[in-house]
Image: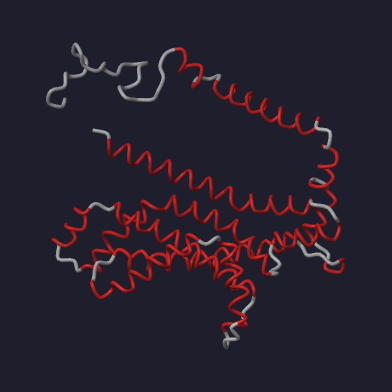
Amino acid sequence: MALSGSPPPGSPGGPPLASAGNPPPGSFARSGRGARLLGGRSGPVISTASTLVVLGALVAIFLLAPGAHAVEHLFLSPQHMWQSFIGDPAAGYYSVGAAIWLNIRMFIVAEILILVLALLIALVRQSVHPALFPIRILATGYVDFFRGVPLILVIFAIGLGVPALSLPVVSSQSNAVYGVTALVLSYSAYVSEVYRAGLNSVHQSQVAAAWSLGLPHRHALRYVILPQAVRNIVPPLLNDFISLQKDTALVGVLGTIEANKAAEIYSEQVFNFSSFTVAAILFLILTIPLARFTDRLIERDRRRRLAGATP
């Protein structure tokens, strides 16, 4: 049905009707010969050829550079890459391949704690109960502080300051524990804002409908608001966790032997940087699948929204 005051599709002065070979009005699709060239049988051939040209140009630039041989020896030496991957404690360096498991363990523990702590902070900041006003002020200050201070400084403050306090149990933990604590404190501030955006994205009519059914506030939050909010924020949450996986390498500044620190020790022993290339490859192996999974979720959410908006 056409909107009031607008000419119907196909009428004089109105939008054209969609026909075979023509995209619907408002679509970004192309029609005619251009669409056949871009999306027809020759499309994969063209994309493959352009990819090969770009990669060939990059390889040619690298190989023709005056210092290509020196860079290849310093960063891409197969011998040093393999030695740094397997490690040799007797020679004074650690295995980068084994050290990456510490990064994975720190990432998993930090992710679970961040999800819980960030949700609590977001719920406190969303609360309007007068008794929670002081806690809301503290939560707001927490978010402002840890979003404003660089993560590396938080790691130094926790990793060097807490042991200096000489507190029972607390001051005798490993550097990995202090590093995970710093990651949780910093990332919870960011993720709590993602949660808040998801909570605010749920339409107030959904809350009113839950209340009209007699659901108390906690049940409405658990069964109506949170499921919809979490579904909306899954892609940005995964993007944050991709960054979290990479930032576990910063814990090495405390002396923890994770992948980046193991690569640094190897480079200092043999004066070759191929170990950093190995560490970079291992981090890519971890982050690229998660990045592609995030893209898939974003695309699925986009299709779902478009399908819901189609009359």
* Side of 3 relative to 52 (left or right): left
Question: Between residues 72 and 79, which one lies in front from this camera angle?
Answer: 72
Query: Image point 12% across, 26% down: which residue?
Result: 4
Please state the horizontal and vertical placement of residue 165, each as a whole percent of the image: 59, 83
The quarter of the picture where residue 138 lies is: bottom left
Relative to 23, does residue 270 appear above or below in the rendering?
A: below
Please state the horizontal and vertical placement of residue 25, each as a whole percent of the image: 30, 22
Query: Image point 57% across, 86% down: which residue?
Result: 167
Query: Image point 35% across, 58% down: which residue?
Result: 196
Quarter containing the C terminus? top left
The quarter of the picture where residue 177 lies is: bottom right
Question: Between residues 286 and 14, which one lies in front from this camera angle?
Answer: 14
* Side of 153 relative to 134 (left or right): right
Residue situated furthest bottom in the rendering: 168
Relative to 201, does residue 100 appear above or below in the rendering?
A: below
Question: Between residues 111 and 265, which one lies in front from this camera angle?
Answer: 265
Tally of marks: 0
The quarter of the picture where residue 83 lies is: bottom right
Query: Image point 31% across, 74% down: which residue?
Result: 134
* Side of 37 relative to 143 (left or right): right
Please state the horizontal and vertical placement of residue 44, each as a whole percent of the image: 57, 25
Quarter containing the N terminus? top left
Colour scheme used in the picture?
Answer: secondary structure
